[in-house]
Image (cartoon, grey):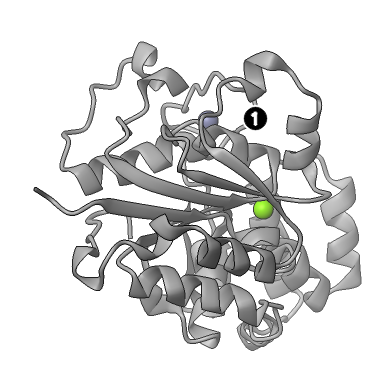
Amino acid sequence: MAPPAGLACFDFDWSLIDTDSDRFVIEHLSPVLRQKLDTCPMQWTDLQNECLKEFHEQGGSGKVIRDALTKVPLDPHMIKVCQLLHSHGWTLAIVSDANSVYIEGILQHYGIRHLFSAIITNPAFWDAQDRLHIQRLIPADAPQHGCPTGVCSLNICKGQEVDKLLRAITGQRQVPDNPAQNSAQSSANDGAVWMMYVGDGRNDYCPALRMQRATDVYFVRRGRSLEKYLARGDPAINGALKAQIVLWDKAGDILHELEAQPQFVSLTSATGMSIEGPC
Ligand SMILES: [Mg+2]
Ligand SMILES: [Zn+2]
């Protein structure tokens, strides 16, 4: 019999790290650009790219951005959480609306990049002039995700991205691009994969619909928009969640919970799975 599989997904901003990386970096670059984040109605990813373009046009150096990434706060207990899961054979993935340069840079700074099998996020790259570009994961001119939950950003449906991870793990073929199969009810997880998810924002609701067991654990950060979304008590929203919800404040709370729940240490290091493609 195949060993059990475990997939641990982390949102990045205010989940794996203790800040919003987009805001943190822009604030580090320029108070004027930081102000622009709160006043400009442009789509969020496009706005990040626009701010970085302006920073470069004003003579800003890429080194300042790279330096900012080394100052992003990450709780040492969160590093222990990742190390514990990885050592027990869990596959770790990040599903984030930040971007690949920030996430890769921050994980490398903390020496934990190797713990993650996949980073699903908006693609970013440095050009020959040392200007950082950020693009939407789903470009504006590509077929849009059409997620029915209403919580996902225009450029990423985290639930559909988790579905792709699950298919990669379970070896299932991609489902046809059929709108009827884009709903949460068509989750790629039939319960064969143990899951945990760490999130803080409303857009972390959609991926939680992919957790099919009562032993799956949904770590919802206290005081942030996801907790408030669930606190409304809408039966259609809360009733669709099958996982156990654990509210957390600090990363130490997650570590404590993992140590208390036997399923997190029941996998062995031999069961680690590879995810091909997304990363
Ligand atoms: Mg977040
Ligand atoms: Zn969605």
Residue 114 x/y as whole percent: 36, 78
**Residue 277 sits in which quadrant?**
bottom left
Could you tell me residue 78's position as x and y percent? 59, 73
Dot 1 crowding, Cα within 10 Å, few <14, some 14–19, many 20+: some
Q: Is mark 1 within 8 Å of ligand 2?
A: yes
Residue shown at 64% from the left, 14% from the top: 236
Q: Is residue 213 above or below residue 125?
A: above
The part of the image, by quadrant, that contains residue 248 is bottom right
User: Can residue 260 be seen by looking at this rendering?
Assistant: yes
Give percent across and percent down for residue 168.
23, 46
Taking depth in this image into account, of 265 and 198 the one nearest to the observer is 265
What residue is shown at x 60% (from left), y 33% (from top)?
A: 152
Q: Residue 95, percent across and down?
A: 49, 52
Of residues 141 and 105, the one nearer the viewer is 105
The kind of residue on which mark 1 rests is Val
The residue shown at (46%, 80%) is 112
- Indicate whether 14 appears above or below 178: below
User: Looking at this rendering, what residue extends furthest in the left direction?
Assistant: 1
Q: Quadrant of residue 279?
A: bottom left
- Residue at the spot x=55%, y=60% of the render? 99
Residue on which disc 1 sits: 151
Question: Is 39 displayed left or right of 180 in the figure?
Answer: right
